[in-house]
Image (cartoon, helix red, strand yellow):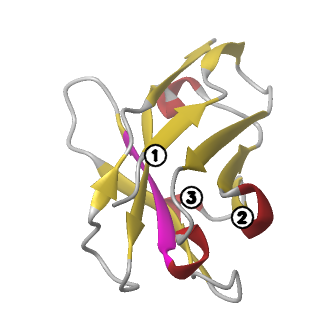
Amino acid sequence: QVQLLESGGGLVQAGDSLRLSCVASGRTFSRYNMGWFRQAPGKEREFVAAISWGAGTTYYADSMKGRFTISRDNAKNTVYLQIYSLKPEDTAVYYCAASMVLGPTYDYWGQGTQVTVSS
């Protein structure tokens, strides 16, 4: 069982940068592949990025490449999402998720953190 808690969201201006954090409970965090997703108002949840358990492999949605960076610190049970040059269309609730298998399905989800970008 893994519990995930996101933080770092807030109200920012277009062009700002933001780093989201997701802290996981449990002693087996390092065995999980981690992902970030987001859901904008009125839209479906979409994949942002993923990182393998050993941080050796990262994946990004094509539309997210360049401005988003995923990383993790297994010693701190934390996965990060750095967002650069924020745009109003980045406004969404950002979720982290954990999976034993690197793929499209995730077993555990956090409650999300709201990011609002003003123009």
Q: Which residues are magenta?
A: 32-38
**Label of residue 75 in the image:** none
| Direction from residue 91 to residue 86 in the image, left or right | right
Q: Residue at x 27, y 23 (%)?
A: 41
**C-alpha span from label 1 to label 2:** 14 Å
Indicate the amino acid at tag 2. Answer: Arg
Labels 1 and 3: the sequence-earlier one: 1
Q: Taking the image as drawn, is residue 105 in sight? A: yes
- Would you say the residues marked 1 and 3 are in contact, meaning their CB atoms lie under 8 Å apart? no
Residue appearing at x 29%, y 67% in the figure: 106
Q: Amino acid at mark 1?
A: Leu
- From the image, tell me which residue sits under label 3: 64
| Whole-percent x, y for residue 43 in the image | 22, 35
Q: Is residue 60 above or below residue 43?
A: below
Q: Is residue 26 left or right of residue 40?
A: right
User: Which of the two discs, 1 and 3, sits closer to the camera?
Assistant: 1
Q: Quadrant of the N terminus?
A: bottom left
Q: Residues within 10 Å of mark 2 (few under 14, many from 20)?
A: many
Name the side, left or right, on which 8 lies relative to 1: right
The foreground one among 55 and 49 is 55
Q: From the image, tell me which residue sits under label 2.
A: 72
Disc 1 target residue:
4
Residue 61 seen in the figure: no
User: Mark 3 falls on what kind of element?
Assistant: helix
| Magenta-colored stretch includes residue 35 | yes
Q: What secondary structure do most residues of the magenta stretch adopt?
A: strand
